[in-house]
Image (spheres, rainbow, N blue to C red):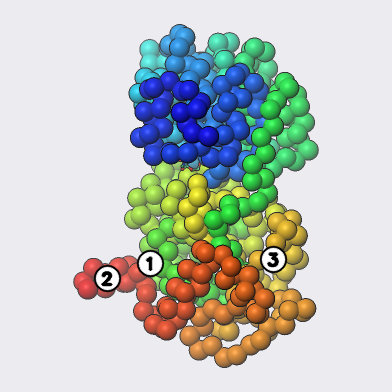
Amino acid sequence: MTFESFELHARIMAGVKSAGYRTPTPIQRRVIPAALSGRDILGLAQTGTGKTAAFVLPILQRLSSGPRGRMRALIVAPTRELAEQIHGEIRMLGQATRLRSATVYGGVGMAPQIRALRGKGRAEIIVACPGRLLDHMNRGHADLSNLEVLVLDEADHMFDMGFLPDVRTIMKQVPTTAQRLLFSATMPEDVRHLANGVLSDPLTAEIGHRKPAQTVTHALYPVERNKKTEMLKHLLREHDPRSALVFTRTKSGAKRLAKQLDSENFFVTSLQGDLSQSKRQKALDGFRRGDYHILVATDIAARGIDVTRISHVINYDVPNTVEAYTHRIGRTGRAERSGEAFTLVTQDDVKMIRSIERSLGTRLERIELEAFAWDDTFDSHHPRKSRPNRTGVGRRGDGRERSERSTRQTDGRTHNRRYRRSRNGPNKQRNTSRAGQQATREA
Ligand code: AMP
C-alpha cells in the first residue's frame, strides 16, 4: 500500500512528500482508509508507530473542502508537549492546505488562544489539553457546535493524569454527528469504558500493542543500588549517545541526577513537572537541536516528547508497570529507526523485570559489568560465568543469550561496537561530555 492509494488531495500529498514519508506505517495503512470513509476509530497504538499522521491526514482531507474560519476538528491530548507535537505534524503535513491549527493549553497566556478560538484568526483545527480547553468553554470562548472530527489522543495518559472527568464534560458539547477517534497505547478498564461510551461501531486498529518497536535492542544491566549513577556515567561514556533519554522515578531524582551529570561536564538537561512552560520548551528545543545529548525526565514529564532521533532510552529507575516500560522504550527506534534501550536493574527490581519479560513474551538480554553488578546471579537457572573484567565493559550473561543476539542484525552491530570500544579502553570515547567534545573539535 502506498500513500497514493489513499487518494489524498494533491496539497496534502505535497505535505507527505516534504515530511519524507515514503510508505505508510501499519497503523496508517489500517486507520487512514477507514477514517477517510468517516468511520469512528479505536486505535491501540503507542507513540512511534506513526499514529499522529494516521489521524491528521484524514482530518486535512476532510477539512480541505468546506467552510473556513471556524473550529471543525478538535484533538485533545494530555500534555503540552504532545499537543505541540501534533500541531507540528499538522503544520508540516498541511502546509499547502492553508488550514489553520492552534494549540490550547495551560501555563501560557489566554489571549492568543482566544484569538484562535473566536477572533479573526480563527483556526479550523484546535489541539488542546483538557483543563485549559474547559476553561475556555466555561468562559464562552470555545464553541464546539461545528465540530466534524474529534480525536482523543493517548487516552490512557489522560486517565493516568486524572483528566477523564474533564474529557467527559468536553464530550457533552461535541455534536453527535462528529466523527470520533480514540487512541491509546493500553486499554485499562476506565479507558475501555470511555471508548464504549464515545465511539459508535468503531474500527479497531491494534498495532504493536504492548510490544516495543522491533528496531530497539534491549539490555538489562544488573547494578548495586549505590552504584547506579556511576554505572550510568560509565554507559554514557561507553556508548557516547547523541540523544539519550534517561528516566527516573521521581522529579527530585531527575533534578538531582541531571545536576550530577552536569557537574561532570555531560551535555545534559532535565524535564520535570515543576518547570514553567518556557523552561520545558527550552530544554526540549535544546535536546532536539542536539545542544544537550542527555535529557533526564520522569514518565509524566516525558509524555508526548517526539524527538525522532532518540538513540538511547536508559531506565535509570525501572518503571512501575509494563505499560510504562513500553512507553519509555517507544521513544527510541521510532518509525523503523534503530535504537537501544538499557535498564539498570537492582536486586529490588527483579520481580518487575520478570513481569515485563512475561508480558513481552521475550527474555531480555543481561549484560553484567563486573565493576557494578551484584554478586547473586540474576537467573539462578542461568548461572553467570564470571571472570574479572578490568575495563568494566560488557559481557553477555551466558552463551544462550549470545547466540540469540547474533541472529539479529542490529545486535551484531552493537556487539561489535561495544567490543571495539572495550579494546580502546573506557576512557577513549567521552564525546558526550563537554571535555570530550572540546578534545574532538581540537583534534
Ligand atoms: P508518532 O507515532 O505519530 O509519534 O510518529 C512517530 C514518528 O514517525 C514521527 O516523528 C513521525 O514524523 C514519523 N512518521 C510518521 N509516519 C511516518 C511514515 N509513514 N514514514 C516515516 N516516518 C513516519
Q: CA distance from mark 2 to mark 1?
A: 11 Å
Residue 177 x, y percent position in the rendering: 64, 12
Residue 397 screen position, x and y as percent: 64, 78
Q: Residues within 10 Å of mark 1 (few under 14, many from 20)?
A: many
Q: Nearer the viewer, residue 436 or 178?
A: 178
Q: Which mark is residue 363?
A: 3
Q: Say which amino acid is labelled 3.
A: Arg
Badge 2 is on which residue? 440
Given residues 290 and 64, the one toward you in this image is: 64
Q: Residue at x 58, y 39 (%)?
A: 26
Secondary structure under tag 2 reads: helix
Residue 202 visible, this orientation: yes
Residue at left offset 43%, top offset 52%: 309
* Mark 2 touches mark 3? (CB < 8 Å): no
Residue at 51% x, 80% y is 393
- Tell me which numbered mark, 2 or 1, is placed earlier along the sequence: 1
Q: Does 169 sit left or right of 86 as displayed?
A: right
User: Which residue is label 1 attached to?
Assistant: 432
